[in-house]
């Protein structure tokens, strides 16, 4: 297999904690959905820096905004009023529901904030109301609260004891009905389990969950960290389901690649957190919120979303026709620009991802059986055609 920039590999293991299995590739520039490594080799990025670069690379309007924002204040602290936080909160509410935002720096922090909100809400109702429900195979982050919510043993086993959480099989209505009760303070759920392998919640499940949360006075908290910011064809993925959650968390695409996270709390619950309850030194600084205003307004514009949906459909159709008749394919799944190709036992998707990467296509392999695709929403038809050409070659070896 071709080695890229291998000089960096040793330097990495000597200087950087080994928390990631890194490919031996170092990117140096990009445009749209196209990346180039240090040797000038071209790649089509179908992963967007794990769902962050929804606007792709070197987006002109974003670069312009970053330049402008860099000349202003970078940081002032949350002891003072930050105008762009208000503007960003208004824009998020306009695209979601009325309420108030808390700003932080990442997805896991947004979920920590939501966890604390749920705990404080529950204490205001009754001392018994302290149970939190989350889904098996979910992913909510790596800090201890969010890790407790993450229903995957492989991430939790070395870090127990964690906070008590009741797990429910995803989209399993009978189990949900057995587990939710008046002591449930909140239910955390993803509309699409992205990191879990792009499993899409059933309409019946989310609607039943909404009505059960209403009945038991439990907060419905939807983690939109990966599915938000236009990723699924709407500003937020719950908007496909005719429900409205009480709280949403978001991060990844919100500032077009800069670190930011946010929790939007609906008006009814928006004043539960009070001064001293929660904080973040960097959270929502003037620079990042100004840039996020630009990124999020582009990402949620209907014309932009329509074009992205058209291209996502084009990519899915192309993949379907390449895989038509392949016995090794179990199923394909898609919501907007979130796609998965799940294969039957015997197909090694880690190896497939390596082969694709060697030929200049960046994808993600999950559980060695699923190829996850999270292309930038700006990916062009030409970039998709180029990628499909490589897929055709690499998939030709599959039964
Ligand atoms: C649904 C979801 N929630 C939370 C997180 C954690 O976000 P972060 O890595 O920014 O802490 C992720 C990250 O992949 C995610 O996909």
Image (cartoon, helix red, strand yellow):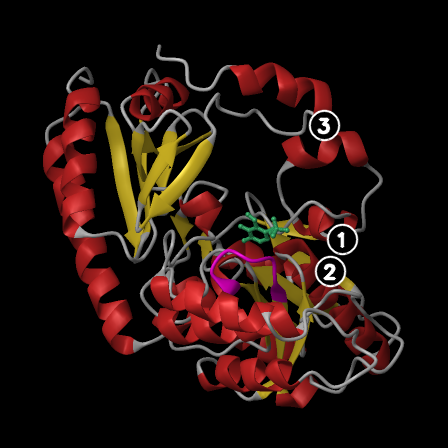
**Towards the viewer: 318 or 241:** 318
Secondary structure mostly taken by the magenta-highlighted segment of the chain: loop
Check contact, mark 2 vs mark 1: CB within 8 A: yes
Q: Mark 1 CB in 8 Å range of ligand 1?
A: no
From the viewer's side, name the closer residue of 189 and 306: 306
Residue placed under numbered mark 2 in the picture:
112
Location of residue 282 by image quarter = bottom right
- Percent position of residue 314, x then y: 15, 51
Would you say 111 lies left or right of 62 here?
A: right
Q: Which mark is residue 17?
A: 3
Specify whether residue 29 is in view: yes
Query: Marks 2 and 3: CB-CB under 8 Å?
Result: no
Q: Earlier in the sequence, mark 1 or mark 3?
A: 3
In the displayed structure, 99 sits above or below 391; it is below
Please tell me the numbered disc located at residue 131.
Answer: none
* Relative vertical location of residue 276 with respect to residue 152 in this rendering, above or below: below
Determine the secondary structure under disc 2: helix
Q: Residues within 10 Å of mark 3 (few under 14, many from 20)?
A: few
**How far apart are labels 1 and 3 at the CA level?**
22 Å
Q: Residue at x 64, y 31 (%)?
A: 154
Q: Residue furthest top?
A: 1
Q: Which residues are magenta?
A: 255-261
**Of callouts 2 and 3, the N-terminal one:** 3
Q: Does the numbered disc 3 mark a residue whose Cβ is under 8 Å from ligand 1?
A: no
Task: Give the residue at x 61% y 29%.
Answer: 20
Q: In the rendered view of the protein, which quadrant contains the N terminus?
A: top left
Q: Nearer the viewer, mark 2 or mark 3?
A: 3
Q: Is residue 279 above or below residue 144?
A: below
Q: Mark 1 falls on what kind of element?
A: helix
Which image quarter holds the C terminus?
Answer: top left
The dot on residue 145 is 1
């Amino acid at each position: 297999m071709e080695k890229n920039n291998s000089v960096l590999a040793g330097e990495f293991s000597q200087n950087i904690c080994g928390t990631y299995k890194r490919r031996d590739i170092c990117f140096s520039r990009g445009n749209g959905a196209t990346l180039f490594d240090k040797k000038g080799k071209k790649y089509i990025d179908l992963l967007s820096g794990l769902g962050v670069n929804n606007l792709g690379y070197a987006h002109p309007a974003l670069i312009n905004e970053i330049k402008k924002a860099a000349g202003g204040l970078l940081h002032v602290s949350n002891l003072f009023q930050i105008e762009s936080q208000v503007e960003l909160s208004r824009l998020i509410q306009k695209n979601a529901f009325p309420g108030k935002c808390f700003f932080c720096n990442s997805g896991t922090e947004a979920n920590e904030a939501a966890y604390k909100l749920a705990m404080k809400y529950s204490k205001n109702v009754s001392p018994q109301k302290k149970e939190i429900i989350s889904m098996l195979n979910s992913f909510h982050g790596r800090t201890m609260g969010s890790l407790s919510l993450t229903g995957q043993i492989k991430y939790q086993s070395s870090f127990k004891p964690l906070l008590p959480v009741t797990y429910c099989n995803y989209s399993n209505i009978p189990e949900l009905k057995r587990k939710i009760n008046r002591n449930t303070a909140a239910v955390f759920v993803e509309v699409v389990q992205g990191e879990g392998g792009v499993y899409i919640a059933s309409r019946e499940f989310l609607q039943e969950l909404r009505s059960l949360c209403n009945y038991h006075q439990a907060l419905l908290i939807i983690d939109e960290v990966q599915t938000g910011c236009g990723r699924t064809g709407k500003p937020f993925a719950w908007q496909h389901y005719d429900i409205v959650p009480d709280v949403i968390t978001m991060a990844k695409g919100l500032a077009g690649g800069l670190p930011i996270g946010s929790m939007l709390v609906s008006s009814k619950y928006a004043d539960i957190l009070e001064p001293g309850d929660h904080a973040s030194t960097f959270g929502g600084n003037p620079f990042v919120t100004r840039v996020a205003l630009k990124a999020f307004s582009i990402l949620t514009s209907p014309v932009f979303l329509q074009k992205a949906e058209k291209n996502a459909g084009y990519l899915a159709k192309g993949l379907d026709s390449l895989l038509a008749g392949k016995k090794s394919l179990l199923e394909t799944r898609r919501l907007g620009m979130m796609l998965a190709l799940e294969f039957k036992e015997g197909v090694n998707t880690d190896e497939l991802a390596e082969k694709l990467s060697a030929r200049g296509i960046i994808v993600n392999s999950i559980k060695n059986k699923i190829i996850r695709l999270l292309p930038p929403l700006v990916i062009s038809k030409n970039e998709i055609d180029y990628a499909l050409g490589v897929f055709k070659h690499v998939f030709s070896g599959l039964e």
